[in-house]
Amino acid sequence: MPEERLIRFGEELDAVKARALARMGDEDVRYVRRLNGFSRTMEIIGRTLIFFSPEPVSFLAGVGALWIHKQLQATEVGHTALHGAYDKLAGAESFASKEFHWDTPIDEESWRYAHNVRHHGNTNVVGRDPDVEFGTVRLTEQTPYSARNRRQLPLVLSVIFPNFTFFIAAHASGLNDVFLHRGRPDKGQDILPDRSRESIRAAWRRGLRKYVPYYLYNYVFWPALAGPMFWKVLLGNWLAETLRDVYSAATIFCGHVGDDVKSWPEGTKAHGRGEWYAMQVEATNDYEVSWPVSVLCGGLDRQIEHHLFPQLPPQRLREIAPEVRAICEKYRVAYKTDTWGRTLHKSLRHIARLGADGGVHEIVGSMA
């Protein structure tokens, strides 16, 4: 049985969630519709400037505008919609989780299962959360060490960060399991249930049905419209994609990785809502940024609040963050927050240490 402290902790957080849900309504619908409209405007401006810019300054302005569009669609608009934040709100039908088209190369159905079900239901529980490792990158000491982990920090910075959504798509669809986790005995963290031909074909189908149209649209269709300026438009689209991926990777790694971030061994289960909430808080980092930067992060600078209440939209996460922090301090649950720069440094330092022989002695969660 969970201790009385955690029972009361859970009750107070339940009350926070209930109050936030009660406030949701027309204001949230207007917010996401206005933000989506602004995003689409940035896309038009960005693509126009990339096409017709006569010099580098206007070209780079176009790249920046297109990046803002892609960033908002990936995070504040898209990630939120796929969590079902707007599913029950009248007027937000175009943002319903099962109908929303994500402007990223990530297959929506794959993401909802790998992220919403597997990750959020089992955050940092080894053997159940597929996100305790990312391809060949070891993110917890409890993930088995191998020689290939020695290169994981350079791999993260030079390959994964600039191509983050491509690798997320492979991770969520199960293609990482096919290529990078072949033959390992522990498949509890895999997306695929097995390595049968049917499972492998399903992984390819999920991956390619989004990869192919997305990359043809961005890297063939739009450049082809430019005729002799093909390479200029291709470069502009690639730069906007890369900016989106680097920014998003810095957002996600900060929220989930660090030497003071807890993880749990295989078989761990929370006993009661309060213990589950405590696990979410202690397996997560927040970081402090201004409101415009937070919007471009999709509210995931409030990753603790997002892990507690994944169906709340970002503006509600920002709203409840001071109350959540106060409750954590009251019940002695470690609430970690710092500047974005220091949090990113902490995350990358931890990845480097986990790449050394044997890794580091990581904090292992205890629900006592």
Image (tube, rainbow, N blue to C red):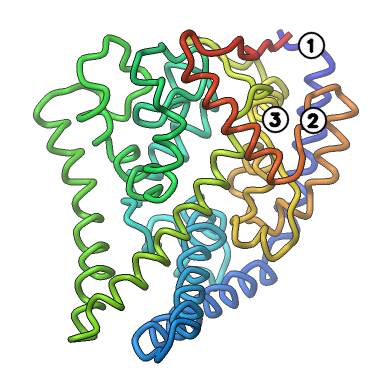
**Which residue matches tag 2?**
11
Mark 2 packing: few (<14 Cα in 10 Å), some, or many (20+)? few
**Which of the two labelled residues, at mark 1 and mark 3, occupies the earlier sequence position?**
1
What secondary structure is marked by label 2?
helix
**Which residue matches tag 1?**
3
What secondary structure is marked by label 3?
helix
Q: CA distance from mark 1 to mark 3?
A: 17 Å
Q: CA distance from mark 2 to mark 1?
A: 13 Å
Where residue 200 appears, x then y in whole percent?
A: 15, 32
Amino acid type at image mark 1: Glu
**Which of the two labelled residues, at mark 2 and mark 1, occupies the earlier sequence position?**
1
Q: Residue at x 90, y 28 (%)?
A: 330
In the figure, is residue 153 to the left or right of 285?
A: left
Amino acid type at image mark 3: Val
Q: Nearer the viewer, mark 3 or mark 2?
A: 3
Q: Would you place residue 13 above or below residue 259 in this image?
A: below
Where residue 227 appears, x then y in whole percent?
A: 18, 86
In the figure, is residue 160 to the left or right of 91?
A: left
Looking at the picture, tell me which residue is in the foreground, 352 or 323.
352
Q: Residue furthest left?
A: 197
